[in-house]
Image: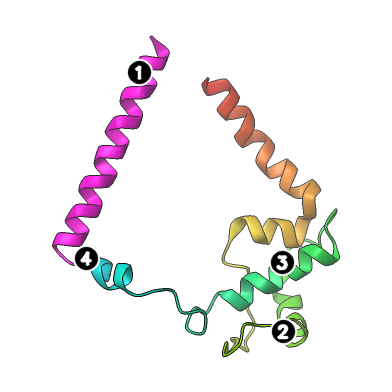
Amino acid sequence: MFHKRAWKTIVVFACMVIILFSAALYFDLGNVQQRLNTPMNVTSETRIGIYLVALEMFKESPLLGKGLHTFGEFYLPYIEKIQLPHGYTPEIAVIPWAHNLYLEILAERGLIGFAGFIAPIIAMGAEWR
C-alpha cells in the first residue's frame, strides 16, 4: 500500500514539473529557450571561481574544514593562488559564502561536518521507506 502511494506521489510530482517547464518554455518565462540554446560559457559563469575556492579550501582541510563562517575571509587569498580556467575573470570582492551549500559545508566544516549535515537526511530517507 505504501509503495503504491509513494509511486503516485512521484508521478504527480513529475507531471507538475513537466507542466511547469512546458509553461515556462511556451510563455518564455525566465528565458528558458535562450538558456537551453546557449552552451555554458565558463568565462561568463561568475560562480566558477567561488566553487573552485571552496574546493581548494576543502582539499587543504578535508577532515575538519577551515572553520565556521570563514569562507569570506579565505576567498580573496585563495582566488589569487588557485588555477582558474583560461579567460575567466574572477570576482574580486568580499564573498561571504560559497553559493553552494554542499561546497560551503565541505570547505568550512570538512567531512565530519558534512557527515553531520547529511546523516539526518539519510535517516529521514530510511524512515520514509
- The dot on residue 76 is 2
Q: Nearer the viewer, mark 3 or mark 2?
A: 3
Residue designated by label 1: 5
Q: Which mark is residue 55?
A: 3
Residue type at mark 2 is Leu
Provide the residue designation for mark 4: 29
First in residue order: circle 4 vs circle 3: 4
Q: Quadrant of the N terminus?
A: top left
Q: How many residues crowd mark 3 within 10 Å: few (<14), some (14–19), many (20+)?
A: some
Residue 16: in magenta span: yes
Q: Secondary structure at mark 4?
A: helix
| Residue 127, x across and y down, in percent | 57, 21
Residue at image location 63% in from the left, 55% down from the top: 102
In the image: residue 57, left or right of residue 4: right
- Dot 1 crowding, Cα within 10 Å, few <14, some 14–19, many 20+: few
Q: Are marks 3 and 1 in contact (CB under 8 Å)?
A: no
Instruction: Identify the residue shown where x is 80% and y is 64%.
Output: 59
State which quadrant residue 96 falls in.
Answer: bottom right
Residue that lies at the very extreme toward the top in this rendered image: 1
Q: Secondary structure at mark 1?
A: helix
**Magenta-highlighted residues:** 1-28
Q: Amino acid at mark 4?
A: Leu
Q: Nearer the viewer, mark 4 or mark 2?
A: 4
N-term-proximal mark, 3 vs 2:
3
Estimate the x, y position of residue 25 in percent, counting from the top left.
20, 61
State the CA–CA distance, disc 1 to disc 4: 33 Å
Is 30 magenta? The answer is: no
Residue 71: % across, % down: 71, 70
Residue type indicated by callout 1? Arg
State the image quarter where residue 49 is shown: bottom right
